[in-house]
Amino acid sequence: MAYQLTDKFGRDITYLRLSVTDRCDLRCTYCMAENMTFLPRRDLLSFEELDFLCEAFVQRGVRKIRLTGGEPLVRKGLLPFIQKLSRHLSTGALDEITLTTNATQLHRFAGQLVDAGVRRINVSLDSLDRDVFKHLSRRDALDQVLGGIEAGLEAGLKIKINAVALKNGNAQEIPDMMRWAHGLGMDMTLIEVMPMGEIAQDRFDQYLPLSEVREQLEGEFTLVDTPLRTGGPARYVKVEQTGGILGFITPLTNNFCAGCNRVRVTCTGQIYMCLGQDDRVDLRAAIRSEDPLSALNAALDKAMINKPEAHDFNIKNPGSAPAVARHMSVTGG
Ligand code: SAM
Ligand code: SF4
């Protein structure tokens, strides 16, 4: 193995979150505007380039790759790409290939994902009520998503449900969603809305601190803290009544940066060292240079030097501008 990716604060980077497209078949209100302008296809890294990139990361100590987007399953050719990538699982160089999906297309791909070595995925779902789902995602796709989840579970995928907690959206529904997820053997994680990208709405009106949600849940359930850590922002509790695990991702009320083990790469090959900062390094230029591997390793070294200690999120004031200009769909969260 080449030298491990380690940033200047001594954090080893072992987790790559790779966005394979900025496109999506939903338009979740906290994530995108209805009339998003997507990138021209020529700007995207090809699957050959993505494979080259992943191999370089694996050689430098990345053990887990999460494919995300936009919606990863809407990019044509994703399955053959994952099948090829799975060689790193066979050699033991990678521990895990996983993805984050909205599950609208999961019914088509669940079996093939399992065959390619994918064992666990995250599914984003903010409501089990058809009208609320339609309102939040601007698409009437709840049945399709539930069908995808069913197909995933049947194929043997372990699924974690991710829900963004929204003040005027799903706040009342969270206990029922948790019961539903845990009842089907799925863990669930709640996410605070983050100020990323212009969305034609004020996130102040959407923001619901998870401390409030936790308090509400504690009126009904016994939440027992667990030491479970994934090197990321989530903190987990076990819910005594359901036996399931509930996670809280609280970038705004808690700072989670000290143990950060991850970087994010966009579908155009920009590496963002922090979800909450705009600083990036262009890996596509390196990959398309005359000596791609040396240039890529040099660019990764630069990224390690530039990785900031902590994010800069703040959503306290009505009307405040997003903390970062890009949308979550650019880096995939
Ligand atoms: N389309 C896929 C999905 O929805 O699972 C993958 C990409 S999506 C950008 C990844 C996650 O980011 C989803 O769970 C979504 O709810 C979350 N997300 C998007 N915008 C967000 C924001 N502004 N604040 C917090 N979470 C956000
Ligand atoms: Fe699409 Fe995911 Fe963003 Fe929703 S959160 S619009 S599903 S990328």
Image (cartoon, rainbow, N blue to C red):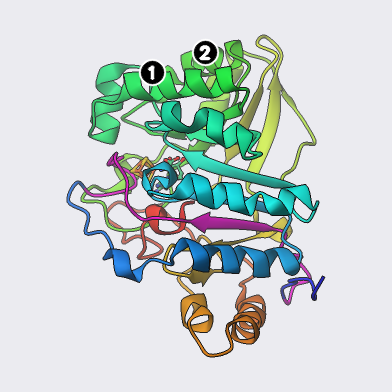
- Tell me, yes or no, if residue 206 can be seen here: yes
- Identify the mark at residue 180; answer none if there is no mark: 2
Ligand 1 within 8 Å of the CB at mark 1: no
Ligand 1 within 8 Å of the CB at mark 2: no
Disc 2 residue crowd, few under 14, some 14–19, many 20+, Cα 10 Å: some
Which is nearer the N-term, disc 2 or disc 1?
1
When the figure is inspected, residue 35 is found, relative to residue 248, above or below; the finding is below
Which of 329 and 218 lies nearest the eye of the viewer? 329
The CA distance from mark 2 to mark 1 is 9 Å
- Residue lying farthest to the left in this orientation: 35
| Residue at x-position 61% and y-position 72% | 308
Can you give x and y, in whole percent of width and height, for residue 40 in the image? 26, 65
Callout count: 2
| Residue at x-position 66% and y-position 76% | 304
Q: Amino acid at mark 2?
A: Trp
| Figure quadrant of residue 260 | bottom right
| Figure quadrant of residue 3 | bottom right
Q: Secondary structure at mark 1?
A: loop
- Identify the mark at residue 177; answer none if there is no mark: none
- Relative placement, left or right, of 131 versus 107 is left
Can you give x and y, in whole percent of width and height, for residue 44 in the image? 38, 66
- The verdict on residue 105 being magenta is no
- Relative placement, left or right, of 48 versus 83 is left
- The verdict on residue 31 being magenta is yes
When the figure is inspected, residue 195 is found, relative to residue 163, above or below; the finding is below
- Relative placement, left or right, of 233 versus 107 is right
Q: Are marks 2 and 1 in contact (CB under 8 Å)?
A: yes
Q: Amino acid at mark 1?
A: Leu
When the figure is inspected, residue 227 is found, relative to residue 85, above or below; the finding is above
- Tell me, yes or no, if residue 252 can be seen here: no
Specify the segment rendered in magenta.
8-33
